[in-house]
Amino acid sequence: MILGEKEIRDGGGNRYTLRLDVDVHSAILNDGKVETSVVAIRHVDGGEDIELTALVRLESFERRLAIILPEQAPIYLDLESFEGLPAREDSEVGPHDDIEQGDAIDQAARDLLDAAGLDQAIETAIQSLPVPEPAFGCVIKAGISTTVGQMIRCHNRHRMIEQRRSRAWEIVKCLGINAPGMTIKAALRTLGCWLTFGYL
């Protein structure tokens, strides 16, 4: 299931697409693990697009989260380090709530500031990810960081559910409800990273 997809252009007019997916069937059938993919694509005019996919797997009952890139050893985050964080009831919206884009952007900006401690821990963990170029790296890292942050919040909200498949399903629903904000947040993080490196 596609959580969101966003095309972003840097200051030089280069086009990138960021797509966030969650594997619903795997979550229900794969012993309670929730696996998402973060796909970053750099569009090359007149040439072949460059694509990089990272997997982010929440192993809720093992109390860890894995970030996996092709031909790389997984990076593991210990969920116990994040279980003291507030559940952030205000970060979720109902599936039928109307959200104005401006409100969603404001919420994403607030989330970036409010979750600074969480984001810093995640950013430290993913700094070693190999990427073909810094601007492209901003896209994939923003997608990973956003996905990891939301998966941890969804895990914290539902970690007391004892049945594996039920917990996994609630986490998948939590990701789906938060999907619009995740996409906007990932785009904002990409733009912030580009500003840091002078690509905007």
Image: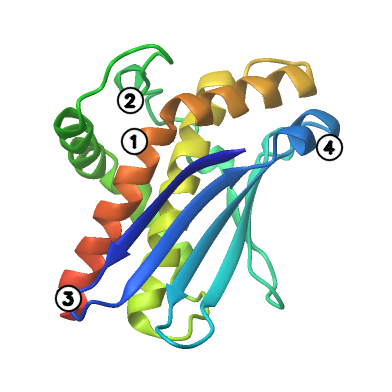
> Which residue is labeled 4 in the image?
30
Q: Which residue is drawn at 38% across and 40% down?
A: 182
Between 188 and 121, the one lying in front of the other is 188
Q: Which amino acid does label 2 sit on?
A: Ser
The CA distance from mark 4 to mark 2 is: 27 Å
Q: Point out the frontmost of discs 4 and 1.
A: 1
Q: Which amino acid does label 1 sit on?
A: Gly
> Which residue is labeled 2 in the image?
91
> Which residue is labeled 1 in the image?
181
Rate crowding at label 2 as few (under 14), some (14 to 19) or many (20 or more) other CA atoms within 10 Å: some
Return the x and y of residue 118 as percentages of the image width and height.
37, 46
Q: Is mark 2 on a helix, strand or loop?
A: helix
The CA distance from mark 4 to mark 3 is: 42 Å
Q: Quadrant of residue 12?
A: bottom left
Q: Point out the frontmost of discs 4 and 3.
A: 3
Q: What element carries label 1?
A: helix
Q: Which residue is drawn at 40% across and 55% down?
A: 121
Picture disc at residue 11: 3
Q: Quadrant of residue 80?
A: top right
Between 191 and 74, the one lying in front of the other is 191
Q: Point out the frontmost of discs 2 and 3.
A: 3
Q: Are marks 4 and 2 in contact (CB under 8 Å)?
A: no
* Above or below for 122 versus 196: above
Q: Residue at x 72, y 78 (%)?
A: 71
Return the x and y of residue 174 as percentages of the image width and height.
52, 24
Choose the circle earlier in sequence order: 3 or 1.
Answer: 3
